[in-house]
Each structure stands twice: as structure tokens, then as C-alpha cells.
Amino acid sequence: MSDLTSTLLSLGTRQPRERRVFDAIVVGSGISGGWAAKELTERGLETVVLEAGGPIDFGGKDFTEHVQSYELKYRGWGDRNTIAKTQPIQGQCYACDEAGHKFFVNDFENPYTTPDNAPFKWFRGRQVGGRSIMWGRQVYRWSDLDFEANAKDGHGTDWPIRYKDIAPWYSHVERFIGITGAKEGLSQLPDGEFLPAMQMTVVERAARENILKKFGGERVLTIGRAAVLTQNHNGRAACHYCGPCERGCVTHSYFNSIGSTLPAAKKTGRLTLRPHSVVTEVLFDAKRGRARGVRVIDAVTMQEHIFEAKVVFLCASAIESVRLLLNSKSTRFPDGFANSSGTLGKYVMDHHYGSGAGGTFPGFLDKRTEGRRPNGIYVARFRNVTSASKDFVRGYGMQGGSSRGGWGRGSGMRGYGAAFKQSLIDDLGPWGLSVGGWGETLPYEDNTITLDPTVKDKWGVPAARINVTWRENEIAMNKDIIASGVELMEAAGCTDVRPSRTMHPPGHCIHEMGGARMAKTAKEGVLNGWNQSWDVPNLFITDGSAMASTACQNPSITYMALTARAAAHAVAELKRRSL
Amino acid sequence: MERRDFLRAAAAAAALSLVPHEAEAQAARAWATLAAPASPDLPVAPLSEAHRAIIRTVADAIIPRTDSPGANDVNVLGWIEVIAQDYYTDAERTALTTGLDAMDALSRQLTQQPLAGLAGAPLAQVMDALDAPTDRTTPAARGYSRLKGLVIHGYFTSERVQKDVLKTQIMPGRFNGAADMPTKGAGRDE
Ligand SMILES: Cc1cc2nc3c(=O)[nH]c(=O)nc-3n(C[C@H](O)[C@H](O)[C@H](O)COP(=O)(O)OP(=O)(O)OC[C@H]3O[C@@H](n4cnc5c(N)ncnc54)[C@H](O)[C@@H]3O)c2cc1C
Ligand code: SF4
């Protein structure tokens, strides 16, 4: 058994010793928790990661990316009766399918509430690895355009950091996790440290050239930037292009915390990983003005435990961390932990998405794809960069892809019999190309998370009440996405171009952010520029709740970079004895 | 939510003009999933032998045995029964059986024979009427469209077809975005 394999296999098993006092506590083992664990242990801290969910067997029965349709009872259509009974909300996410639904929470054990007129979709994973198991792996750096936006147009509060503060940390993260992508030299979408790019299809290449020509280089269609290895890297194997990554990846060819950051933390000998540990409260040491530790309910035995540490990192995901803080009340913080600003639970955001356009791409019928590329194409933001919109502020990026119809087109085609059958076997139909927008949303004070007064989860913790709605800016931007999607498809060379007019409710994009935002002063936000609580210096929150705006790029790489940076800062402060 | 999700959403919204009917079917399935009430765990009556016989006849008419297996060779009926019994709502199951009955009635009207077991020219006459109807809203046309989708999905996702006909590679080990089309019958990996 290789070192890596044995490290991986031992991850997620309960540690024999029940030590309760650590240098650091990390709540959550997902994308940000994994990074906190790696950086804190590598910098010398004895760290416990408290994870509400259980371990997963990624070498065996739990990772099912190679399971074929004929091995599934419903051949990929999904076990909808089971999902309807236990996961009516999670089942609305594409990745919560027949093979992968075990990576999503049980909606009845994990309830949340919304006002009737403000639906919110909250898609969650509770297991060692969190949503790093099922995420789509798209990773795009933010730029100064994003960090300066609040200050420039006055929506939300100014970020206390700029691109130069985080750029080296993006590089640090990218070098470790491995990102495939192509450098484009765009100021609004800074290049990263990339492994070789995945190939575009013939159609995407042609579309890129046509679009560049038509828009004079203003609109750039590039290959997606994804946390997937195109060559062996850091002890992990290159992708073998099997396709359904959201069901797991036995070779850990895409980044997830159980294949990358947690094994690195484990290697230091300073990691204690405790699954089935539902953190219910952050405890306050009023004398020292510090977080003392956390209260935990063992999800299996329902017993209560206290864990103590010099520093506490909350990485439970945006809404969960806010819920936890709201549930941690004391005389000093009657409205939620570290909430002297009164901003805790406010300015909650998600990207809006769903609209775009698609069309038929004529020609190239002698070409097809080989292998299933776990990545798509990306159109970098172009609105309010070089061309201004009079209807909205900020911008959007577009993601999409191309493919040929294959046998799936058969049920919509006329024909039957031998020739029909052979055409479905031998021909693939025309190429299709499509893009959809991922739009920035503004931080509104009254888009909120509070605690529901009556509903509790299985462990007795009050459920989150989420009240988030789209406003004029998002709706105007969504309209523009449809129009420019059509323009792009036409410029690309498509025929039969059709707009897609959908605007999913908030949450659906699974990029929930805000609620414990960073700000320049203690009055304006919960965290300073180091993801450190203004009120309680040994408390750090490094998941999406820290975000003061959303940009339009997928956010998780920014959480990783901020987490690594915050961990380095915390350790330095500990060494200086200022925590 | 990411690219795959968008692609699915786009397909469901018929943004991809390639496969409007498949897209509509996907959208219908997605909505049916959302609307599906928690199933009451009651045993559902299996399809009747008469319905099974109609499915066998039409399935092999759509995908006959050639130098590769036909629909019945890979037991498409078995897959359709799983869907009818465990997956469909009562309303969807009724729509399927009503559709099968309407197709049978059409056969009796056109050929004076039941659809089950029909062969040769009379079968071709019924299939032509079903496959290219002037009125797509009739129960027979709707039933046929539903059945055709099931047959094609069941056939192409079966083990034999995946392995021997499409020659799907589970781990291709590479991605080529501009591969040549294979020669006929060489299989392909989608
Ligand atoms: C299908 C899908 C596709 C996505 N695609 C992308 C993408 O392409 N690009 C991108 O940037 N983002 C994507 N995302 C979003 C991305 O997964 C999240 O932004 C990211 O995982 C957030 O990281 P996190 O560490 O904050 O939370 P998570 O990864 O969700 O981890 C949080 C962990 O904390 C644990 N936890 C929660 N509460 C408690 C508690 N009280 N006590 C102890 N433990 C607790 C949870 O069990 C979980 O394991 C996608 C998500 C999904 C589901
Ligand atoms: S990353 Fe590559 S090898 Fe891993 S599941 Fe995705 S496609 Fe398969």
C-alpha cells in the first residue's frame, strides 16, 4: 500500500485518543476546512477538524464515477421516489442523481425555512470533504475590478483587501491543487499558474476565432479553468476523462479535500479528524475576550462534548457558519457571536444564473469528441469592463460547451427500423453550442439569514431562515445575458439560435456568500482583512460568509486562497502572542 | 451550479435546437420529479401481458435485430417495466397504458388486426402512421412518442449495446476535441 493510499484510507476514521484541547479547531472539512487544516498543521499547530458528517469510502462503494448506466436501476434517470422522500430540495441539483445523491444532505434532518414569496435553494453536503466531492471545479481568480467594485459604485462596503494581497495566495493554492487553463492576459480575469489546458473542440475553436473577430477582441471565449489535473501532480494521477466527476474520483484527479489537503495535514502528524461532530455553539471566554472553543454533539451517540483551542476557524460553509454564530449567544454578544457591528446574517448573496443561448453549429460533421472532458468553455466578463451598460452595474461571465447529439436525439427524430437504428449508431447528428451567464449580485442589507424561532434540525439546533431575493440590478443583468448570449452564438457562427430564459431562485447556483462580511472597520463588518473577527481576535471565518461582494467568477478558489492566507496570519499572530 | 447543470437546463428549455423532443422529454421528466408525491410504497400492478406484447412488437419495429442486437435482444421491455412500475407516477403509468391501447386501436382500424405480434406490411402501415402522424396530439401519437423515448433509452443504455455496439470506453485516458469519425460499425465513445 502506498503512503498516499494508507493516508487516505485512515482519513475519516475516528482517532483513538479523545483529546479535547488543541492549538486550533477547524469546523468543517470541505473546501475551506481542508485548506485551514493543511496550513495550520503544516505551520505547526495541533489541529482538530470537527466535521458534522461521516467518513466516506472513496476507494470502494461511495465513489461511483465508473458505474455504468446499465448498472443503475433507473439507468441514470434517478431514484426519484427515494429522493422525493428524503431529498426533495437536494434532488433539484443536477449532481444529486441516482449515483451521487448520498453526497447530499437529508432535507428532513437538515431543514431550513424561507418566506413563501422568497424561495431559496440550499444544496449541501455533510461528509468528510463537504462539497469538494461534488463541486464543478471551475476556478477563476478575482481581479481588482472585483475588489474595488463596492468602493467605486457604492453598493456594499469596501473590501479591506485588493488583488495584490491575495494574488500570491492564489498562486500558492493553484500550485498545490493543480489547475488546467489557458493564459489570456485579461485584466478582469487574471491568469493563474496553470497545468496544460484541456482541448477545445473544433467547434469551440472556430467559435472563439469568430467571436474574437466580430467583437474586436473584447469578448474572449477560452477553455474553462478547472481544478482537474491534465498531468500527474503532487502524488495525484492525471484525469482519465471518464466524465461524471460529481460522483467522486478514485484517482483524485480533481481537487477535493479528502484527496489533497486533508492527506497533507494528516502527513504532519498534527491532524485529528473527528467526523460525526456537529458543532452547535462557539464558546466565549468573557474574561479574555476570546473564543474558548466549541460545543459539539456527537451525531451518532448524541452526547455533548466541549473542544478547546487557542484559535478557532469556522469553515462550515457560508450559511452554516452564520447559523452557528447566531446560535452562539452570550451576555457580551446577545445577537450572535462577534456581532457588535450588527451585520452578522446580512448582505447574503449568490450568483444568478440559468439564462443564455444555444444553437446548431453547422459543419464539422466528420469530427467528434473522444473522451469525456470534465470541463467546459468560459467567456470572460465583458460588460462594464470595456463596454458600459446603462441598465446595470457589475457583470457576468459565461460558461458552456459544445457536443453532438448522439443517440439521445433519436426519440425526437422521425424514423424506425434498421436504417434508423444504424443512423443512431453511426451518426452523431449536428454539433450544438451553448453558453449561459453567471451573474454578479449586489450585497443588500435585507438579504438575510436569521434563526427560525420554531424549526430545529435533527440535533436540536435552530434552523436557518433564509430571506434572499433578486432585485432590479440582477433582473436587468439577466436580460442582458439573454441578449448577449444570442449575439455570441450568432457571432460564433451558429444557426437556429435560441435564447434560454431562466432565472433560478437564489441559492440554486450553490455560490452562497456573505453574512459575516469582511470590512475596513469593526462597525461595518464582522471580519477584518485577514478573515479575523474584529470582536474576537482568535476567531477566523474563511468560508463564503466572509465575502463582501460576489464578483461573477465561481468563488471557491477565492475561499481557498483567503483561508491559506488567514491561517498563515493566525499562526504568525499566535507566535507573536497577540491572539 | 456549473456547466453541466447549465447544459441540462438549457436543453430542458429547448435552447439546444438539436433535439427538441428529447429536450422536452427531459424537461417533462424534471418537472415530474419535482411534482412527484412521496410514493406510498404500495405494490403497483405490473403491465398486462397484452401491453407487454404491444411493447415487444413496437420495440423491435423501432430497433430491429440486424448485425447488432435488436430491442428485445437486450430486454428493453424489462427496463420499461421497471420504469412503469417503480418510477412512474400513477398518472404517467396511465398515460403509458392508455397510449398503448390507442396504438392498438389504430392498428385494428388500419389493418383489422391487433398490434401485438403484427409483422410485415401491416406493421409497416401502422408504424408509418404512428411515426409520421399529421396530428401529434392524438393518444396514439403521444403514446408512441413516449414509448419510442423509452425504447431508445433502454436500448442504448443496455450493457450489450454499450459494450459491443457503441464500444464505450469507461476510462478513455484522453480527450480529443477534433477526433475523426470512426468508420461505420467501429463503435464510438460518446
Ligand atoms: C454540484 C456543485 C457544483 C459546484 N461547482 C462549483 C464550481 O465549479 N466552482 C466553485 O467555485 N464552486 C462550486 N460549487 C460550490 C462549492 O462547492 C462551495 O463553494 C464550496 O464547497 C464551499 O466550501 P466550504 O468549505 O465553505 O463548504 P463545504 O465544502 O460545503 O464544506 C462545509 C463542511 O462543513 C461541515 N459542517 C457544516 N456545519 C457544520 C457544523 N455545525 N459542525 C461541523 N461541521 C459542519 C459540512 O458537513 C461540510 O462538510 C459547487 C457546489 C456543488 C454542490
Ligand atoms: S477528474 Fe477525470 S478521472 Fe476524475 S472523475 Fe472526473 S473525468 Fe474522471
Image: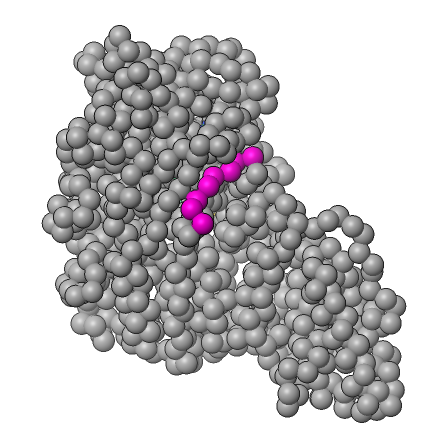
Query: Relative to residue A296, is residue A430 depicted above or below?
Result: below
Q: Identify the residue at the far left of this view.
A: A152
Query: Which residue is painted at 21% across and 38% down in the image?
Result: A166
Query: Which residue is painted at 25% across and 13% down in the image?
Result: A289
The quadrant of the rendering that contains the C terminus of chain B is bottom right
User: Residue A80, position in %: x, y?
Assistant: 63, 52
Query: Which residue is painted at 77% across and 80% down in the image?
Result: B102
Query: Relative to residue B174, is residue A285 depicted above or below?
Result: above
Left or right? Give the position of A468 relative to A415: left
Q: Quadrant of residue B24?
A: bottom right
Query: Relative to residue A301, is residue A140 depicted above or below?
Result: below
User: Residue B145, position in %: x, y?
Assistant: 66, 76
Colour option used: one colour
Q: Quadrant of residue A207?
A: bottom left
What secondary structure do most residues of the magenta stretch adopt? loop
Answer yes or no: is residue A415 visible. Answer: no
Left or right? Give the position of A108 relative to A397: right
Left or right? Give the position of A572 relative to A39: left
Q: Quick one: A555 or A561, which is closer to the camera?
A: A555
Answer yes or no: is residue A572 visible. Answer: yes
Q: Is residue A113 magenta?
A: yes
User: Residue A79, position in %: x, y?
Assistant: 65, 51
Query: Which residue is painted at 32% across and 26% down in the image?
Result: A336
Q: Quick one: B190 or A504, which is closer to the camera?
A: A504
Q: Quadrant of residue A70?
A: bottom right
Magenta stretch in the rendered image: A109-116
Q: Is residue B29 magenta?
A: no
